Amino acid sequence: MFKAIVSADTLRTTIDSVSVLVDECKIHLEEDGLSIKAVDPANVGMVDLELAAEAFESYEADGGVIGVNLDRLDSIAGMANADQLVEMELDEETRKLHIQIDGLEYTLALIDPDSIRQEPDIPDLDLPANVVIEGADIDRAVTAADMVSDHIALGVDEGDELFYVDAEGDTDDVHLELTREDLIDLTAGPAHSLFSLDYLKDMNKAIPNDGEVSVELGEEFPVKLHFETAEGLGEVSYMLAPRIQSD
């Protein structure tokens, strides 16, 4: 059983947070909200999303799992204005999702969850450095790095207590430093890892510019990015595997 009413804005934000990595996913419809875990086909980036029942205008579910094509769901949600409400109801017999937006009715065929890639086990990494930064600063770093390279290094200088971003191109380089005063918070620890910029660019699309992002880092370890959505009633975590540099 699943019946819910949610603002189009919240629905689109939720879809976008996952669709930057995968085209389809399993959605767990728990009594207290929905959750999604997914990993991209190359096993480089993963997403862990939770959206509390309180983020919906109304929400009823009893613990089922559905498989969804995110592009199709996004197209449907895109037909609504940000403040319009989207009504969704699962038809258990036909395994289809009935969606209503202001008189418009759409029946979305669901995907067999067993045919979707297995969900990742999110590793519990205790990383030594944690940077709390404004989304706009991540956007600035990613945009600048993209001008010169397809890789980006993220690190923390323990001695100087700063977070830095490096991108080295064939001819041009980018270096960005943010001190403790520039950041919302900093737990300094040994951290320096190189990442694929393409993945970080995709994740950056879903990161709110005006929001706080927690960035956890280590030395040649994955980076973990956490941020809230739906006015604090949703949480998105990304994990991105590093490119191990060969000497």
Image: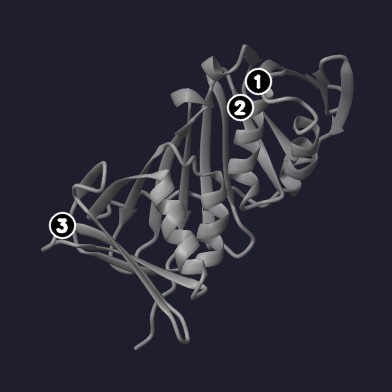
Q: Quadrant of residue 184?
A: top left
- Residue 7: image tag: 1
Q: Earlier in the sequence, mark 1 or mark 3?
A: 1
User: Which residue in the rendered view is the most extreme toward the left?
Assistant: 159
SS at circle 3: loop
Q: Nearer the viewer, residue 100 or 33?
A: 100
SS at circle 1: strand
User: Which residue in the rendered view is the most extreme toward the top?
Assistant: 58
Q: CA distance from mark 2 to mark 3?
A: 36 Å
- Residue 161: image tag: 3
Q: In this rendering, would 191 be left or right of 158?
A: right
The vertical placement of 189 against 244, above or below, is above
Q: CA distance from mark 1 to mark 3?
A: 41 Å
Mark 1 in CB contact with mark 3 (< 8 angstroms):
no
Mark 2 in CB contact with mark 1 (< 8 angstroms):
yes
The vertical placement of 139 against 219, above or below, is above
Q: Position of residue 162 (x, y in %)?
A: 20, 58
Q: Earlier in the sequence, mark 2 or mark 3?
A: 2
- Mark 2 packing: few (<14 Cα in 10 Å), some, or many (20+)? many
SS at circle 2: helix
Query: Looking at the image, which residue is at 89% across and 21% down?
Result: 105
- Mark 1 packing: few (<14 Cα in 10 Å), some, or many (20+)? many
Question: What residue is shown with label 2?
Answer: 10
Q: Quadrant of residue 90?
A: top right
Residue 196 in sight: no
Q: Position of residue 60 (x, y in %)?
A: 64, 13
The vertical placement of 118 against 149, above or below, is above
- Residue 226: image tag: none
Query: Looking at the image, which residue is at 81% across and 36% down?
Result: 110
Q: Amino acid at mark 2?
A: Thr
